[in-house]
Amino acid sequence: MKLRHALFKRLNLRESWVIFFILGLVMMNYPFIQIFNKPYRIFSIPLLYLYFIGGWAISIGVIHLFTRAIDQPEDEQDEGDQH
């Protein structure tokens, strides 16, 4: 419970939003795209497609965490610091 409050408090920071946005931009540019643009297939799906689908799913998860952190009232976030 204490870890959850600390995570939500940390995710509420504007710097966290900016860092994840920049990380998303970097992951969708040349070096990373080239790394996964190989002729390999996993379960008959090209590796590049799996990279895009995985990145998409992870970004949805991160956005979910950010929205949960915003929805937390301030008194519930500070509750973890008092115990």
Image: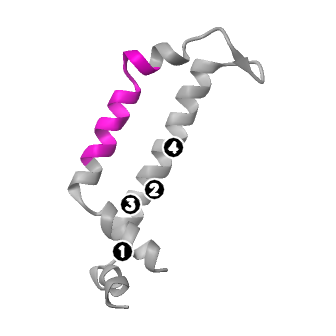
Marks 4 and 2, how far apart at CA: 10 Å
Q: Quadrant of residue 75?
A: bottom left
The residue wearing badge 3 is: 67
Total tally of numbered discs in the picture: 4
What label does residue 64 carry, if any?
2
User: Are there few (<14), some (14-19), or many (20+) residues within 10 Å of tag 1?
Assistant: some
Q: Quadrant of residue 24?
A: top left
Is the Cβ of the residue at disc 4 closer than 8 Å to that at disc 3? no
Is the Cβ of the residue at disc 4 closer than 8 Å to that at disc 2? no
Is the Cβ of the residue at disc 2 closer than 8 Å to that at disc 3? yes
- Mark toward the start of the polypeptide (2 vs 1): 2
What label does residue 58 carry, if any?
4
The residue wearing badge 1 is: 72
Q: What residue is shown at x 57% (from left), y 19% (from top)? A: 48
Q: Between tags 4 and 3, which lies in front?
A: 4
Label 2 is placed on what type of residue?
His
Q: Position of residue 55 (x, y in %)?
A: 50, 35
Q: What residue is shown at x 63% (from left), y 20% (from top)? A: 47
Label 1 is placed on what type of residue?
Gln
Marks 4 and 3, how far apart at CA: 14 Å
